[in-house]
Image (cartoon, grey):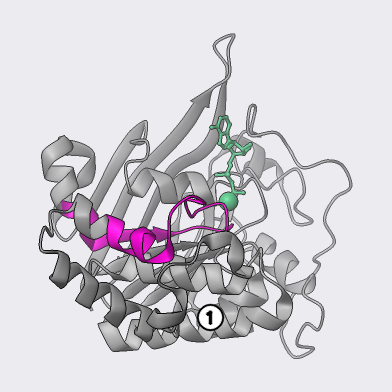
Amino acid sequence: MSDLLAIQNLTVEYPVGGGRHVHAVSDVTLSVKQGETLGLVGESGSGKSSLARALLQLPPPKGGAVLFEGQDLTKLGGKALRAVRPRLQMIFQDPIASLNPRRKVAEIIAEPLIVSGVSDAAERTRRVRAVMEAVGLDPDLVWNRRPHEFSGGQCQRIAIARALVLEPSLIVCDEPVSALDVSIRAQIINLLEDMKARFGLTLLFIAHDLAVVKSVSDRVAVMYLGRLCEVADSESLFTTPAHPYTAALMAAIPEPDPDVPLGDTKLKPGDPPSPLDPPSGCRFRTRCPHAQPRCTDEVPPLRQIAPGREVACHFPLVG
Ligand code: ADP
Ligand code: MG
């Protein structure tokens, strides 16, 4: 499979005054293959949303390249970028907040069509109706209603319809079910998987919850404090985690599989470090039960340990 999206050495920093920066995303290289679902997992504050927004150039990253369908988005000007935008859509964590409360549902879903120049009103109506039906909304019932009249799950359906209406190739789903009731989550995940199959989409699926990522992803990338720890196909990652942080995440899910060898997953006591002043060497070393002096001195590069498996650790658990 070829890469639909290739992120190269992506760096996102936020100035916070006094010459200091939040190191939100540091030197991340990662690709998403045509047609796959790539899960991106990491605890809150690890830089997942910063990475997602940087892909869409909202705002552009401090450094690195974002190759999408062969073009480096960081080098495109406003007009060329607007031409690409329809192909690259995003769904956010808080569905209600992501929808304009004053607009009717039909207007919300039609807006991207208007912005991208679909000037024929009948054509817009036809496409909005079709996409509403695809996501399981009855056009006749929802057309003139406003977001506050719907539950979080229904609002996420509206947001998905809005993302789909321009027929994108890639959808970045930033914690699309984290704000929803547990009972609704599976419905929205199933909907995304149905839409993926039906429209031939590629998904970058972001979550802080490893269990959610496991259920949807072909491959998984694990992020910690702005850097990638590990990238692997789901099967390998969940049966033989290579990075001690991945193992710690797996040990923390409610019913870890007793057959998976996790080694020592007990994190060192103390607070997680600040992204304002991340640890030298491996950023996970201050909490890692396996850390050695080398981990303080040298940044572990993301390196291949088996076909399709990469890990950024001097002392990986496998390989
Ligand atoms: P995640 O989505 O994994 O929770 P974020 O990308 O939201 O992580 O945040 C990564 C880090 O960047 C966090 O420390 C967060 O506080 C910080 N951050 C995010 N947005 C901003 C901003 N606009 N200004 C300053 N710091 C930010
Ligand atoms: Mg986030």
Q: Which residue is mark 1?
A: 189
Percent across and percent down for residue 179 are 66, 63
Q: Which amino acid, mark 1? A: Ile
Q: Nearer the viewer, residue 78 or 300?
A: 78
- The residue at the point 36 percent across, 85 percent down is 133
Question: Quadrant location of ligand 1?
Answer: top right
Residue 182 relative to residue 319: left or right: right
Assess whether residue 87 is covered by the magenta stretch. Answer: yes
Residue 77 relative to residue 235: left or right: left
Q: Quadrant of the N terminus?
A: bottom left
Please, what secondary structure does the residue beneath circle 1 have?
A: helix
Q: Quadrant of residue 313?
A: bottom right
Residue 227 relative to residue 218: left or right: right
Q: Quadrant of the C terminus?
A: bottom right
Magenta segment boundaries in residue numbering: 84-111
Assess whether residue 125 is covered by the magenta stretch. Answer: no
Disc count in the image?
1
Q: Does the image show residue 120?
A: yes
Farthest right residue in view: 269
Task: Please say if 133 is above or below 209.
Answer: below
- The residue at the point 44 percent across, 65 percent down is 159
Task: Please say if 266 is above or below 272.
Answer: below
Percent across and percent down for residue 107 are 34, 60
Percent across and percent down for residue 243 are 62, 64
Q: Nearer the viewer, residue 70 or 224?
A: 70
Q: Does the image show residue 242?
A: no
Q: Quadrant of residue 215?
A: bottom right
Q: Nearer the viewer, residue 9 or 150?
A: 150
